[in-house]
Amino acid sequence: MLRFAMLVLACAGILSSAHAEDTLRVGSKRFTESYILGEILTQTAARVGPAEHKQGLGNTAIVLGALRSGAIDVYPEYLGTIDLEILKNPQPTSLDAMRAALRPLGLGVAVPLGFSNGYALAVRGDASVRRLSDLAAHPEIKIGLSHEFLGRADGWPGLARRYGLAQQPRGLDHGIAYEALAQRQVDAIDIYSTDAKIRQYGLRVLDDDKQYFPRYDAVLLYRLDVPQRFPQAWRAIEQLQGTIRADDMIAMNAAAELDGQPFAAVARAWLSHAAPSTVHDGLLAKTFGNGFMNLARQHLLLVVLAVLLGCIAGIPLGIVAALVPRLRQAVLAVAGVLQTVPSLALLAILIPLLGRIGTVPALVALCAYALLPIVRNTCTGLLQVPSGLRTAALALGLTRRQSLVEVELPLAMPTILAGVKTAAVMSVGTATIAAFIGAGGFGERITTGLALNDNDMLLAGAIPAALLALLTQAGFELCERVLARRRYSD
């Protein structure tokens, strides 16, 4: 079984490496504009050669890690983010200085797309504040900020210092921040200047009267070998320079966020200078359309392989914990610690360590999360075997190994199987996080729904995942009943 699992992983790695050699891989972050720009780049490059879009790869740290590791080749970024967040410059620098600093990292910046999308803070139209400096005089104002903005060098920490703000902001996903503001759960949120929802919600953008925010001109951050590896695709992408106006970007964001159009359709319409379709898909169409079978296959593959690898690693560790008392606490503690590592943090760490995004790091993370119930239940099941049975087995002439394999493990099997069932059901839910690193599955719909604040899209991902979890649990319970009947008949 171990050799089979290693063979599957090796084949997956070989296939993905071979595929990577001749395919331009475009990345994007997990917000509407980045999705759309990623589609524009992908569709432009696909006119002259193979290209794929690794969409919604989380925040800057994850997508940058994917770029540096070679898991993606290019993604849309903003000069202010490159300067202050990636290069950690305390003050804005020139484009030439950025290029010089990026060159040792094997990265470059090029193709300014023609618009700027800066950060800003916005309040409801009836609010009394008009400038960022007014916030200092109103500590009662509740601020909700995206998690990335909370930690960025050019985000909340520097903004609070520049304006002397004492508020303790709440972390909110950018996709639901507008709704939280409209429902008065918060009074101010961070926005992008090209957000279509500014007009829809009638918001007031606070004046940056102390000029804290730098310019965020949209550009491409790419690996320096891309023009040589994909000369035709790169020449096609260079034709996009200066072609996207701010009004164009606002209109495209509106088509996705307000009209519910797919990102690919919005990008295709802009490239062809056509108006995007205004037909809205219902929950049923969103659930069973848009590549349902492919997403289901990806999700199921992740769960099956993760549980398989978890059993290969966890059952032997559980046996060790049961048979060697001095190692028991250490083994269970390590498995427990792995369970507590935040999933996004673990995925962000695995990308540079493994040098790739997609299935392999997702499997490593899911396997780590599956270990604890498998290890613990294996150990518990073996410890619950009556000591008299072990003594009787040895008295009948069985070796210690034979006693373990032929007596103790079969008796402990119901408990072990319960642990595997728990790990499998947990993996179905946890596998949705794999979409943040391009591993696919139903999580793709959940991340898209969060980006668009589209409840139907969220449900289109959550409902199949929940049904798969129920089917998984039912399948294991059926196995447990069959096992119990066999034990009873024996």
Image (cartoon, grey):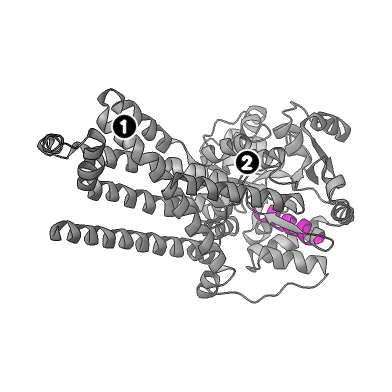
Give the structural element (helix, strand or loop) at label 2: helix
Q: Nearer the viewer, residue 482 or 356?
A: 482
Residue count near mark 2 (Cα–Cα under 10 Å), binned few <14, some 14–19, many ≥20:
many
Q: Which amino acid, by three-letter code, is at mark 1?
A: Val
- Determine whether 362 is above or below 317 in the image: below
Q: Nearer the viewer, residue 397 or 134?
A: 397
Q: Which amino acid, by three-letter code, is at mark 2?
A: Ile
User: At which x and y percent is residue 160?
Assistant: 62, 31
What stretch of residues is rendered in magenta? Answer: 31-44
Q: Is residue 166 magenta?
A: no
User: At which x and y percent is residue 446?
Assistant: 53, 58
Left or right: 345 as drawn, with respect to 26: left
Q: Residue furthest top?
A: 326
The residue that appears at 32% across and 59% down in the rendered structure is 473
User: At which x and y percent is residue 291?
Assistant: 58, 68
Q: Which mark is residue 320?
A: 1
Real-space Cα separation, disc 2 to disc 1, in angstroms: 36 Å
